[in-house]
Image (spheres, helix red, strand yellow):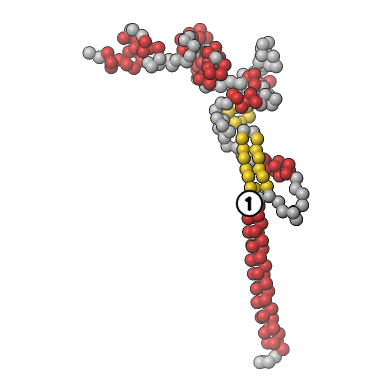
Amino acid sequence: MPGSPLEEAGDLAKPKSKEKKTKSGSQIRKKRKVRAEMVKKETDRAIFVSAKGFHFEVHFRFTDNEPHILLSQIAQKTAQKVYIQRSGKVADCKQITCDENQVLCFGKDPENKQSFSSKEKKEMPALQTTGIDFGTFWQLQDVLDVRYIYSNNIHAMLNTYGVEAARETIIREINNVFKSYGISVNIRHLTLIADFMTHAGGYRPLNRFGGIVESISPFNKMTFETASKFHC
């Protein structure tokens, strides 16, 4: 019936629901506005960022009303979330064991070489990188054993440690290639190849652009894919 108490109660309830919706909507907009201001405030804190080698410098701006903040905790939390993709000439770095073929380890005293079993080598950690930067690794001598740095980059070993190190690297790398296929090669053959490539004090390739070019024998040159030059 019109004018009944139920209808009057219903009419009074409608405006209240609108007020609640309006109030909730204003609160959401207010929260969004505060959140946006907070994000903008955080981005405006850093006013200067500089990185040089292993040293990082960041300047922050704070107001007088803010409490004291321990930057060491912020730096530690940030360091755990940051992944370094590349550092100079080193593009990748992972932890392996000394059981790998390209890892050199002869004990604490390199002059008195020790032999370790495969089980012992698997428990000894090592680092493997993509790329080489000897200067950077030498600066980490308090953390890494830099006496056993090795690279399959012949030019890098030649320019850093000399021609004898480059010669040993050639022998080791050729031997590892054949070993991966289960082929054993006499060490005399490998030393002969390494001596030919490094006897002049540098690193010459073993192909038709290396010492074969200087050969006076046409049959010797023909063996390196240059037979068409001698066709009559």
Residue drawn at the location 66% of the way across and 17% of the way down:
117
**Amino acid tagged 1:** Thr
Instruction: Classify 10 Å Cα crowding around label 1: few (below 14), some (14-19), many (20 and above).
Output: few
Tell me which corner region of the image, top left, top right, bottom left or bottom right, holds residue 48. Answer: top right
Q: Tell which residue pokes out farthest to the front in this image.
A: 64
**Quadrant showing the N terminus:** bottom right
Q: Which residue lies at the image location 68% right of the left edge and 10% below the top edge?
A: 112
- Give x and y (percent) for residue 149: 61, 21
Name the image quarter holding residue 104. top right
Q: Residue 105 versus residue 149: which sits nearer the camera?
A: 149
- Residue 73 drawn above or below residue 91: below
Residue 114 placement, left or right of 198: right
Q: Is residue 207 above or below residue 13?
A: above
x and y percent of residue 100 in the render?
Answer: 60, 23
User: Would you say 193 lies left or right of 125 here?
Assistant: left
x and y percentages locating residue 125 in the rendered image = 66, 25
Q: Which residue is mark 1?
A: 43
Residue 194 in picture, x, y percent from top left: 49, 12
> For the view shown, which residue lies furthest in the right direction?
68
Question: What residue is at 66 percent from the left and 65 percent from the top?
Answer: 30
- Up/down of 138 relative to 222, above or below: below
Identify the image quadrant of the C terminus.
Answer: top left
Residue 22 occupies quadrant: bottom right
- Residues 93 and 184: in front is 93
- Residue occupying image coordinates x 33% and y 7%: 217
